[in-house]
Amino acid sequence: MSLKTDIRQVENIYRALLGDDKFLRWTLCPDDELDAYWKKYLMENPDNIEEVNTLRSIIRNMRVAEEPLTPSAQSELWSRIQTSVSRDRQRRRMTTFLRYAAAIAAVVALGTWLYVHYASRQSRTVDYQALVSETVDNLTGNVTLVLPGDEKIEVSEANVDVVHDALGKLRVNQEIVKEKSASSNKTDNFNRLIVPYGKTGHVVMSDGTNMWVNSGSRVVYPAVFEDNRREIYVDGEVYLEVSPNASAPFVVKTDRMEVRVLGTVFNVSAYKNDEVHSVVLAEGSVKVRGTGEKQETTLRPRERFTLNAEANRSQVENVDVMDYICWKYGFLSFKRETLTAVFQRLERYYNVRMEYDVAAASRATFSGKLDLKDDIAETFRIISVAAPVKYKVETDKIIIEIKSL
C-alpha cells in the first residue's frame, strides 16, 4: 500500500467519524447506550482504534472557535500541512506526522460542525421563565392550554387529555382542535399547559411520550419536537413515560434541576414553593444535576434524588416508587411525612386554603394512605385518627389546630 493511499484512508476514517453524530455525542456527552455501541464498533473494527482514540483526545482538548473557518481557509490549512513535510523524510516519521495532520484537518471541519450544532443551539436557548410568567398566574379555575401564537384553550373538566401527533395536530378530550401553523421561529413553537389546583392532566407529546401532570403545575413543551432535541420545562409535578430515541435525548428542566434521559419512566416534583425538589426513577436510567452542581448523578430504578435548595444539599436514597407516583392513580401515600408537607399537597389536590401553625405542623408527622376520591371532610377525619389534629371545615377554608405532643 502506498503512503498516499495510507494517508487517504486515515483521513477518510477521521472524516467518517466526524460525520457520525453518534461519535460526536459519545465523545462530548457519553452515556451507557453510546458506550455499548462504540465498544461493539471497536471490536468489529480493531484497525480503527488508534484513529478513534486520537480523534476523541483532540476533540476533548480543543476549544470551539468563535467563528468557523471558511472552506477556503480549511483548504489552505490542509495544503500547508501537506507541503510542510519534507518528501525525503523517513516513511515512518512521515506516516506518523500525516496521521496527526489528517486529524488536524478533520478537526477544522469539526470546529465548523461544533459551531453550527452547539453555538447555534446556545443562541436559541429558551427563556422558560419568561414563557411561564406569561401564563395564568392564578392556579385556580380551568385547565388552560396556551398554543403558539398565544391562542388559549380552556377546559372545565377536572381531568384533561391532550394528544399531539408527529405533525402537530391536536386533540383535547377527544375533540380535534384546529391549530395555527407552527412558527418558523423554534423558540416560539411552544405550548404552555396550566393545570390548576384540584385538577390533573395527561399529555401525549409529538414523539409519543406520555406525561401526567399533577395539580398546581405548569409545563412548557414544543408543539413538535425537533429531530435531535427534546426538551420541556416543569414547574410542579409530572410523571413521564419517555418514548425511546437514542439520537434525541429527552431533557426535563426546572428552576433547580436538569434531568436527562433516553427512554425511561420517572417522576419529577419541582414546585417552586416546596423546600425539597425530587426525581424518582421507576424504570430505565436518568442523569440528574442540580443547579450549580458540576457532576451529574445517575439514578437506578427505585432510587430517589432529592435537592434541598436552602441547605444546598442533594442526596440519593432507595424508596418504594409507588409512594411517589400514586397521585397518578388517585391516592396519596405518606410515611412519617411532616404535617406541613401533607397539608401542602392536600391544598393542591382539593384546591382549598388551610390555616394552621406552620411551626407546630413541622414537628408532627403523619403516615397512611388517603383516597383522593374522598371529600375533604372524610380525608381530614382519617388524618385526625392518626395525627394530633383538630379541624373545622368552613366554606372557603379549613382551620386546623395541632395538638401539643
Image (cartoon, rainbow, N blue to C red):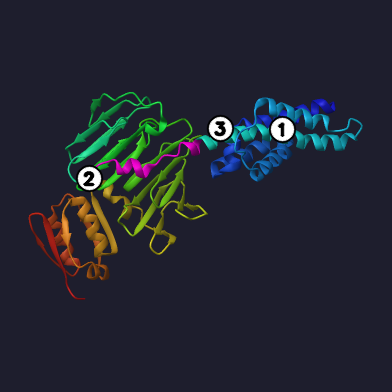
* Element type at mark 3: helix
Q: Amino acid at mark 2?
A: Pro
* Element type at mark 2: loop
The residue tagged 2 is 196
Classify the position of the N terminus by image quarter: top right
Asked if disc 1 and disc 3 are in contact, CB closer than 8 Å, the reply is no
Bounds of the magenta span? 121-136
Taking depth in this image into account, of 85 and 396 the one nearest to the observer is: 85
Q: Residues within 10 Å of mark 3 (few under 14, many from 20)?
A: few
Which residue sits furthest right?
Answer: 88
Res. 310 in view: yes
Point out residue 272 in the picture as x, y percentages from the top left corner: 32, 53
The residue tagged 3 is 116
Q: Residues within 10 Å of mark 2 (few under 14, many from 20)?
A: many
The numbered mark at residue 359 is none
The residue mark sitting in front, 2 or 1, is 1
Point out residue 276 in the picture as x, y percentages from the top left corner: 35, 59
Quarter of the view holding residue 73:
top right
Taking depth in this image into account, of 75 and 342 the one nearest to the observer is: 75
Which residue sits furthest bottom?
Answer: 405
Q: Amino acid at mark 1?
A: Ala
Q: Residues within 10 Å of mark 1 (few under 14, many from 20)?
A: some
Q: Is residue 133 left or right of residue 290?
A: left
Q: Amino acid at mark 3?
A: Val
Res. 233 in view: no
- How far separated are the C-alphas under marks 1 and 3? 17 Å
- How far separated are the C-alphas under marks 2 and 1? 56 Å
What residue sits 43% from the left and 51% below the top?
301
The residue tagged 1 is 105
Q: Is residue 123 magenta?
A: yes
Point out residue 273 in the picture as x, y percentages from the top left corner: 30, 56
